[in-house]
Structure formats: C-alpha cells, structure tokens
Image: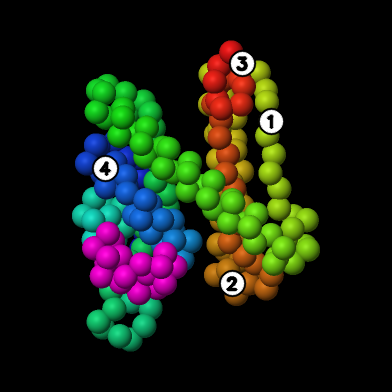
Amino acid sequence: MSASEETRRVKDLETLKALAHPLRMKLYRALYVAGTATASHLADQVDEAVSLVSYHLRKLAAHGLIEEAEAASGDARERWWQPAAASISTRDEDFRDAPERAAAHSAVSRMHARQQHELYETYLDTQSTWDETWRDAAFSAEYLVSLTPDELSRLAEELNELAAKWRARGRAAREAGDTEGRENVAIHLYGFPFRSWSPGGKES
C-alpha cells in the first residue's frame, strides 16, 4: 500500500483529539521523516517504550492518519507504518463553529508550535557539532509586512508551492541514491496578523 500524495485536511473533532497528544505528534513527525518505520524504530527516536509507541501508533491508525506499510524486512513479526497522506493540515475555519471545537484546535496548534520551537532549540543547543557548511546554510528570519487577508492567503500558497518543489527534489534525489551530504531540514513559517506588540505578547 502506498501513501496518498494528497494533503489530509482534518475537520472532525475526534481525529483532531487523536493528534492532541504530544507523543503522537512527535511520532507522526518522526514517521513522516522516515517514510516507513516500525514501533521499535520510532521508540528509539522518541525514547519511549515500544509498547507505548505501538499503542499510540494504533490510535493514529484508527483515525486514518497513518496506515500499514509494506514490510522492509523479512521479519513477519514486525509491523511497518507510513503516513496515510503526503501531509496533514488543520484550519481554524473548520473548528470555530463551537467553543469545544475551537478550544481543541487551539490546543493542537499551540502544541505544534511548541514542538517546532523545541526542534529549533535542539539545533541551537547542538549547533557547534554541525559542520561549518551547515551552520552557514542554516537561517532564521522574520519579515514584517503590510498585507490584506487575500494577499496573505496568496503568499501562503506561493510558499507552499516553493516548499513542495524542494521537498519533491529532495525525495527524488534520495530515491536515486543521491544521499551524500544530505540531511533532514526543518523549515518553519508562520503568517498571522498583529497590531502593536510588546515583550510578553501583550498588545499596547
């Protein structure tokens, strides 16, 4: 079975709640990077017991977020998993119709943002261990611009198209055996409105 190439847009509350667990979110990210993996592989990456990882993988599978994959080894006892879609997304507009749904989406969004920040902080903590070429290539940038909602939407589409192009390029290179000097790279982008701001996130 091969994973779909389409983005899975999560709209139902139960599937959203299935994602609202820090370990499940980490497992989904680790599986996305690996492509296919077993619970044992993923347990090593998240430093948790295989039994616990297996439980959370089954929960993700029950909501169609991951699926069984073709075994990459001859051990019939190993259960291999893969993402069920090329990516998943959640949108505020799908959950703002009721307080419980809005709160659940906000919680998932905050957890996702925290894990993204933790991933970047891990890089900063280990920056000195990376080769200078990677340290020179890594970047962090903030752009403050004046846009309309329509312009912000169009900017998001352009950024998604650009990221998809480079993701496809990297995948094709790895499939062709071009792995020399190639590493996993995280790119985090946010686009949101703000007015005046002061330290602590308080509006003035």
Hey, what amino acid is under mark 4? Lys
Helix or strand or loop: what does disc 4 sit on? Answer: helix
For disc 2, the neighbor class at 10 Å (few under 14, some 14 to 19, many from 20) is few
Report the residue at 28% width, 61% height from top: 57
Disc 2 to disc 1: CB gap under 8 Å: no
Q: Position of residue 36 (x, y in %)?
A: 40, 68
Helix or strand or loop: what does disc 1 sit on? Answer: loop
The stretch drawn in magenta includes residue 54: yes
Please report the bounds of the magenta region as a residue range: 35-57
Dot 2 corresponds to which residue?
176
Q: CA distance from mark 2 to mark 3?
A: 49 Å
Quarter of the image that includes the C terminus: top right
Mark positioned earlier in the residue sequence (1 or 3): 1
Q: CA distance from mark 2 to mark 1?
A: 36 Å
Residue most toward the front? 200
Q: Position of residue 35 (x, y in %)?
A: 44, 64
Dot 3 corresponds to which residue?
196
Quarter of the image that includes the N terminus: bottom left
Hey, what amino acid is under mark 2? Ala
Mark positioned earlier in the residue sequence (2 or 1): 1
